[in-house]
Image (spheres, rainbow, N blue to C red):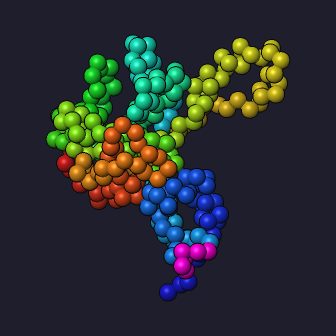
């Protein structure tokens, strides 16, 4: 048996292309991959390169590319929500979110849905319809049609698609999403779209340059304004509603105003076989 190649934490981060915060969250909290056992819990963290490579390969086939047209569809939805006067508050508080934050959250959520749609089609040749209509009330099911033969039918189970930042280790649901019958889904798919904070700047780069090109500081940043590029979204996995854990906190975050229902991303179903089992149930 060949000797295992062991990597330091720095080498492992470089091998996977992850920043320190994301890497720490993934192995300390999300159980995405394991570090080798340290004697007496002390010493440097070390990782098995073969195991990291296996994780990376699985991650790569679940990482879906999203283009400008995908983004524009999501932005259109977000602007429609904003301009009809929809109020979005921070979770567990009465504090209203400002425009950029609201748009980013709506775009991120819709990008996750499109990524799932593309993932199902690309990897399993399963076509699904998404609900991009504007509703007065919250609609819990994100997949509203499944193609069978040449027609779309209603799904046999309810599926909710949830999104979070790439570094986040947990699928997190509010209590009402689980306890209220009209809000809950049977299956929750967790996605981590990698949308830059300055996505609106990238989209409107030419207009912004035209507006500020004669201003005093323009020369200091004119070559640093990023251009729009395709984005990626990891389809992290899924779980059933009865697999969620009811908690008041997760590492680094105490929840206010009630419980949350959570699942570590590394504990989600994500193998090809498990995805096929879900699709067979749709």
The magenta span reads 38-43
* Above or below, 122 relative to 277: above
Residue 254 in sight: yes
Is 37 or 12 nearer to us in this picture? 37
* Above or below, 156 relative to 40: above
Is 236 or 248 nearer to us in this picture? 248
Identity of the residue drawn at 24% across and 34% down: 183
* Residue 87 image offset from top left, x and y in percent: 41, 19
In the displayed structure, does residue 8 sit left or right of residue 166? right
* Above or below, 49 relative to 16: below
Identity of the residue drawn at 46% across and 23% down: 96
Identity of the residue drawn at 61% across and 21% down: 204
* Residue 231 image offset from top left, x and y in percent: 53, 39
* Residue 229 image offset from top left, x and y in percent: 59, 35
In the displayed structure, does residue 166 sit left or right of residue 119? right
* Residue 140 image offset from top left, x and y in percent: 26, 33
Residue 118 in sight: no
């Amino acid at each position: 048996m060949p000797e295992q190649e062991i990597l330091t934490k720095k080498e492992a981060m470089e091998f996977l292309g992850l920043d320190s915060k994301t890497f720490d969250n993934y192995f300390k909290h999300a159980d995405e991959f394991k570090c080798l056992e340290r004697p007496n819990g002390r010493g440097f963290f070390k990782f098995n390169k073969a195991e990291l490579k296996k994780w990376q390969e699985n991650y790569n086939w679940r990482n879906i590319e999203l283009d400008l047209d995908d983004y524009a569809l999501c932005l259109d939805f977000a602007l429609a929500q904003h301009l009809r006067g929809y109020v979005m508050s921070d979770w567990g508080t009465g504090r209203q979110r400002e425009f950029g934050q609201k748009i980013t959250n709506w775009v991120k959520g819709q990008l996750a849905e499109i990524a799932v749609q593309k993932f199902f089609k690309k990897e399993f040749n399963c076509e699904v319809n998404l609900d991009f209509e504007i509703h007065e009330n919250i609609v819990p099911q994100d997949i509203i049609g499944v193609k069978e033969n040449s027609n779309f039918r209603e799904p046999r189970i309810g599926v909710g698609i949830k999104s979070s930042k790439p570094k986040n280790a947990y699928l997190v649901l509010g209590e009402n999403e689980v306890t209220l019958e009209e809000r809950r889904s049977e299956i929750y798919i967790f996605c981590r779209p990698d949308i830059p904070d300055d996505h609106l700047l990238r989209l409107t780069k030419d207009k912004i340059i035209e507006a500020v090109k004669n201003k005093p500081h323009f020369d200091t940043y004119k070559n640093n304004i990023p251009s729009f590029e395709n984005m990626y979204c990891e389809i992290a996995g899924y779980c059933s509603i009865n697999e969620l854990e009811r908690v008041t906190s997760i590492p680094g975050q105490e929840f206010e105003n009630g419980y949350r229902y959570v699942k570590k991303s590394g504990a989600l179903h994500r193998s090809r076989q498990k995805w096929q089992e879900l699709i067979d149930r749709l």
